[in-house]
């Protein structure tokens, strides 16, 4: 009997072990690799192996030769603006769906299509639509008198990053919409009816009842989307490659350039660690302040 | 509801649908346009369809046909490899009270939202060193950093729904936990397992950063294939659109099939939908 | 003496016997001697430039003549680079022949990733090595007094302009030969642009010119021509010995060039800040650009409305080519000379067959055949051999070859974009800063000052300043001497 007891007590850990071990191996290797090599001068264009120990040089060079701060600013801006826009647009559409008029079911099924696209595909799609000579979207916007920058949206330093955010918003607003709609469905009708009896306006009900009840879902959505935007690479790569100038450089794109274009492995390793630290801080802050009460 | 309200809502719904689906339809049309008509303005909705873009990319010379095969191999491989790991973990997290459960769940999700580019460059070197550079297994194994955490989360949410009494009844019959797992949980959670696999497949299919760094020409996947049409001598919009359209079809079809599970899948099981 | 498996003497013997019997029998006669050891297969990695299409169209002729099967795999630029780095990192024989960007020669040669072709060339007189333009060899193929590759496609830069527009504006045709270009300066060039910019031609409002603004690589390709023509050098001393890589990118000449580059951009469509190479060519061929300078392949590419559309462009009979202007009347000129060459990874197990292929593909016969390919228009005139430029048939297809040749002869790929081992990193920051200056985010002075600092950081971080390795006096004269000695002259 005692045997069986310990067996059952250990079983969950035994079951977890394989996935944890595989993931640890897959995660720790790159992190350890990056940590070790961040102190070495290693450029694949100069030779196949690390050339010499360079102390903290790589960390210094991250700030000296790559546009680190601009990229950090852009990355955070993209994350905040994108998440904000997607949440509120998504909420609006969720409320539309919640009217349950005929056709909302079909709409829900089809609406999600942009989210199913690979981000590179979405990038190409909008690169085509925003092409300065012959792009449909640009043509239409010019037609209605929208102030289109002469270089096009992707070529203008003020609009390039916003355009990336807009394309991401196009892609992911449907995701917010259908998830928030599911959230709306789960809100107990009785709570609302009680409030209605109290004479609360629709507007007040939304702010003081619906939104707070959606909070757990919203917190989760915002977290994963913020981080996905933080990691944006595919869209940046296809739409602007970080340009013009550094206007749409993101941290992920910087890593790509140093690692897979310049092949400066040491420098990339140092940059990797800086990004890992930033990401850990963000995720832990989030888990600590907003997310900790969540029960799994 | 008042008639006037209804009209406004339907108008808004129509606008929303045009905004979100119009660009996709326009891009699909591009795939059927002759290259010289890619930029014709004002836009022409009706034109003589041209199949040459698909012909060039998938038939003759058909450089993208092998990429389609690669995409299937990589996505299927990543999905199948993740399943046993994820099933075991999801079962443990669903059925046992244990210390550190929250931590483990949070750890999985932090892997899901960590920047993949951080891992890719070390993998690039590692795969070269162990002779896996450009191989399918390089992509399939490294994609597990996303596939396993995702599948664990989603599968756990499905297993949570299998009633405990059924399993307990099996224990009374003398089956041990493992046997009960295979006899009760797997069959009852099968829809969930299928749904999870389909999502893992889609996420692997749409992933670009791993294949971009870890594949070679003969193993590269379709979404990466679209990028190569940005050559230094010209951009082939027709070819980009043709490959992109083929690349977007499987995820679209899968999402349509998944219907009511879409919400759950996209939120890793956190929102039931 | 010889490093490859087959010894030099054996090789010469085989060559002598079969070669004497067959030489001249077919255009590829000199290749037939390896047919004996047929059913070999070689793998060739190329890049998706126009020459690749032409090469594929004629490769059957090589297989027919030699029995060697050729697998050509075409990749995008970054994919090719990643693939090669990967292969070299693991020392795996991924391919027998590879397309080499001129910028990669130094790192590939210094690391032993590709093998020197000197002994192949030296023992193989039918390579007609002396036929190559020394400027092409110097810019694309030599490093430290050895030949590492042979040029498959050489690009210089030159001017394309609209004859109908010039006529309407009453501007004389531009000089198509250096001999007539005594007074032809960049100031004249800008003067014409200002005159034609905004002009109306048959209902089309014309832009003076177009630039290529996309960062980092495309913008550097175009800007560096202007900048070199203005006298900019990247480093204190390179390629002449002793090498000193202390940057001189922030020179007065370069500041003047960047100011004028901005002027050029103001006379271009605003969206050209996002243009890649082909965007500029396509824009010109669509008909609202008056004049621009670009790589010479665009001399023929602009005849098509878009690459591979096969539709003749509206400018096809209204375009003329001209030589680049100089900074001062009759002053010195440096032309950007770039392109692709074929090299052999040292890991290749088929070196003999690989050499046969390289020799054939870069040879005059195959190059001519590539130039004659007519699939959706003639798409190859990037010759590196004097005899191709002299060929009457090719001159008929490509009437601009004389101009192109003159530009080639002023070409210097080692000065305009110096192939230092970490060129890509330098180009990355340089292109970014030029682009920044174009957006107006920084002034040209600031942009170049930042570039200078970044160059300094990158170069010293990579131990290029001070340069501890032995220098080589890498001059055109030395390449000519090497060419003469390998040609047995």
Image (tube, coloured by chain):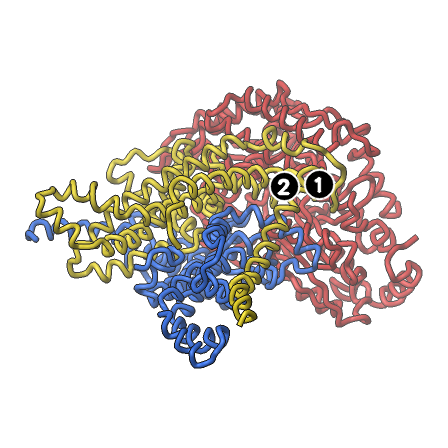
Chain colours: A yellow, B blue, C red
> Does residue C355 appear left or right of residue B223 in this picture?
right
Residue A37 seen anywhere in this rendered image of the structure:
yes
Q: Dot 1 lies on which element? A: loop
Quadrant housing the C terminus of chain B:
bottom left
The chain that hosts pointer 2 is A
**Local crowd at mark 1 within 10 Å, few (<14), some, or many (≥20)?**
many
Residue A6's disc number: none
The chain that hosts pointer 1 is A
Residue wearing tag 2: A269
Q: Nearer the viewer, residue A26 or B224?
A: A26
Residue at 57% from the left image edge and 37% from the top image edge: A274
State whether residue A89 is above or below residue C207: below
| Quadrant of res A276 | top right
| Quadrant of res C246 | top right
Q: Are marks 2 and 1 on the same chain?
A: yes
Measured from the top left, where is residue B143 in percent x and y? 54, 58
**Local crowd at mark 2 within 10 Å, few (<14), some, or many (≥20)?**
many
Q: Extreme bottom residue here?
A: B173
Residue wearing tag 1: A42
State whether residue C305 is above or below residue C242: below
Residue B52 seen anywhere in this rendered image of the structure:
no
Measured from the top left, where is residue A27 in percent x and y? 58, 51
Given contact means CB atoms under 8 Å apart, are the residues at marks 2 and 1 in contact? yes
Q: Dot 2 lies on which element? A: helix
Q: Extreme front residue here?
A: A1
Q: Nearer the viewer, residue A61 or C88?
A: A61
């Amino acid at each position: 009997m005692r045997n069986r007891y310990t067996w059952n007590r250990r079983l969950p850990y035994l079951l977890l072990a394989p996935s944890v071990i595989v993931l640890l191996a897959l995660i720790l290797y790159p992190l350890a690799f990056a940590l070790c090599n961040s102190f070495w001068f290693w450029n694949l264009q100069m030779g196949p192996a690390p050339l010499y120990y360079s102390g903290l040089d790589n960390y210094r060079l991250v700030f000296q030769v790559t546009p680190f701060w601009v990229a950090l600013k852009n990355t955070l801006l993209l994350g905040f603006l994108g998440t904000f826009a997607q949440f509120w647009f998504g909420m609006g559409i969720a409320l539309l769906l919640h009217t349950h008029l005929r056709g909302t079911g079909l709409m829900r099924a089809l609406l999600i299509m942009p989210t199913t696209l690979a981000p590179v595909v979405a990038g190409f799609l909008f690169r085509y639509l925003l092409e300065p000579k012959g792009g449909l979207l640009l043509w239409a916007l010019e037609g209605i008198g929208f102030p289109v920058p002469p270089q096009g949206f992707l070529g203008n330093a003020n609009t390039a990053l916003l355009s990336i955010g807009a394309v991401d918003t196009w892609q992911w607003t449907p995701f917010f919409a259908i998830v928030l709609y599911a959230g709306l469905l789960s809100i107990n009708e009785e709570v609302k009816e009680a409030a209605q009896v109290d004479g609360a306006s629709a507007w007040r009900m939304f702010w003081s009842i619906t939104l707070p009840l959606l909070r757990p879902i919203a917190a989760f959505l915002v977290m994963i989307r913020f981080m996905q935007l933080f990691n944006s690479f595919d869209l940046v790569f296809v739409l602007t490659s970080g340009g013009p100038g550094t206007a749409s450089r993101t941290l992920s794109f910087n890593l790509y350039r140093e690692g897979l274009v310049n092949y400066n492995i040491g420098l990339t390793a140092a940059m990797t660690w800086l990004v890992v630290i930033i990401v850990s801080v963000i995720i832990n802050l989030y888990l600590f302040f907003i997310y900790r009460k969540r029960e799994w | 509801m008042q008639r006037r309200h209804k009209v406004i809502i339907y108008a808004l719904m129509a606008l929303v649908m045009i905004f979100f689906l119009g660009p996709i339809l326009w891009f699909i049309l591009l795939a059927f346009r002759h290259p010289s008509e890619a930029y014709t303005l004002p836009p022409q909705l009706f034109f003589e369809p041209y199949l040459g873009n698909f012909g060039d990319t998938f038939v003759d010379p058909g450089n993208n046909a092998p990429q389609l095969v690669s995409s299937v191999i990589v996505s299927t491989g990543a999905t199948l490899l993740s399943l046993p790991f994820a099933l075991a973990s999801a079962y443990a997290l669903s059925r046992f009270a244990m210390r550190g459960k929250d931590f483990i769940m949070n750890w999985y999700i932090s892997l899901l939202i960590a920047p993949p580019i951080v891992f890719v460059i070390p993998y690039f070197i590692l795969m070269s060193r162990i002779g896996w550079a450009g191989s399918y297994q390089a992509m399939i194994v490294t994609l597990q950093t996303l596939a396993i955490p995702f599948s664990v989360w989603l599968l756990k949410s499905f297993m949570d729904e299998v009633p405990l009494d059924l399993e307990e009844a099996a224990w009374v019959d003398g089956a041990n936990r493992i046997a009960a797992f295979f006899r009760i949980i797997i069959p009852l959670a099968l829809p969930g397992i299928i749904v999870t696999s389909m999502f893992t497949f889609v996420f692997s299919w749409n992933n670009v950063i791993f294949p971009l760094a870890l594949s070679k020409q003969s193993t590269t996947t379709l979404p990466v294939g679209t990028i190569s049409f940005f050559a230094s001598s010209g951009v082939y919009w027709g070819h980009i659109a043709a490959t992109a359209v083929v690349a977007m079809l499987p995820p679209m079809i899968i999402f349509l099939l998944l219907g009511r599970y879409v919400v759950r899948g996209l939120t890793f099981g956190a929102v039931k939908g | 003496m010889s490093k490859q498996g087959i010894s030099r003497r054996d090789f010469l013997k085989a060559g002598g016997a079969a070669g004497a019997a067959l030489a001249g029998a077919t255009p590829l006669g000199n290749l037939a001697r390896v047919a004996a050891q047929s059913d070999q297969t070689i793998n060739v990695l190329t890049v998706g430039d126009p020459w690749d299409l032409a090469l594929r169209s004629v490769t059957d002729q090589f297989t027919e003549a030699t029995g060697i099967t050729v697998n050509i795999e075409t990749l995008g630029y970054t994919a090719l680079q990643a693939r090669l780095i990967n292969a070299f990192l693991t020392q795996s024989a991924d391919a027998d022949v590879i397309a080499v960007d001129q910028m990669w020669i130094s790192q590939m040669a210094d690391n032993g990733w590709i093998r020197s072709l000197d002994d192949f060339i030296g023992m193989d007189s039918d390579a007609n090595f002396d036929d190559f333009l020394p400027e092409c060899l110097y810019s694309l193929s030599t490093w430290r007094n050895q030949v590492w590759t042979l040029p498959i496609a050489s690009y210089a830069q030159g001017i394309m302009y609209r004859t109908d527009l010039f006529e309407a504006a009453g501007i004389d045709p531009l000089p198509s030969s250096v001999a007539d270009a005594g007074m032809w300066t960049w100031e004249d060039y800008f003067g014409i642009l200002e005159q034609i910019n905004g002009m109306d031609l048959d209902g089309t409002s014309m832009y003076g010119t177009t630039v290529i603004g996309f960062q980092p690589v495309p913008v550097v390709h175009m800007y560096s021509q202007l900048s070199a023509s203005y006298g900019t050098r990247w480093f204190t001393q390179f390629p002449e010995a002793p090498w000193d890589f202390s940057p001189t990118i922030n020179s007065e000449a370069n500041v003047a060039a960047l100011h004028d580059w901005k002027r050029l951009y103001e006379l271009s469509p605003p969206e050209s800040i996002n243009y890649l190479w082909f965007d500029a060519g396509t824009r010109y061929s669509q008909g609202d650009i008056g004049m621009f300078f670009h790589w010479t392949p665009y001399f023929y590419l602009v005849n098509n409305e878009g690459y591979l559309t096969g539709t003749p462009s509206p400018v096809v009979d209204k375009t003329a080519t001209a030589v680049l202007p100089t900074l001062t009347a009759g002053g010195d000129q440096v032309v950007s000379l770039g392109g692709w060459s074929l090299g052999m990874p040292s890991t290749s197990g088929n070196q003999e067959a690989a050499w046969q292929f390289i020799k054939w593909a870069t040879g005059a016969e195959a190059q001519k055949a590539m130039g004659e390919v007519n699939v959706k228009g003639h798409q190859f005139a990037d010759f590196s051999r004097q005899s191709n430029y002299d060929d009457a048939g090719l001159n008929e297809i490509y009437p601009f070859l004389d101009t192109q040749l003159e530009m080639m002869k002023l070409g210097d790929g080692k000065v305009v974009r110096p192939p230092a081992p970490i060129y890509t990193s330098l180009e990355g920051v340089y292109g970014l800063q030029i682009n920044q200056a174009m957006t107006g985010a920084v002034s040209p002075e600031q942009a170049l000052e930042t570039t200078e600092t970044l160059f300094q950081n990158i170069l010293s971080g990579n131990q290029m300043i001070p340069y501890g390795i032995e220098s080589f006096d890498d001059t055109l004269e030395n390449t000519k001497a090497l060419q003469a000695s390998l040609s047995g002259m």
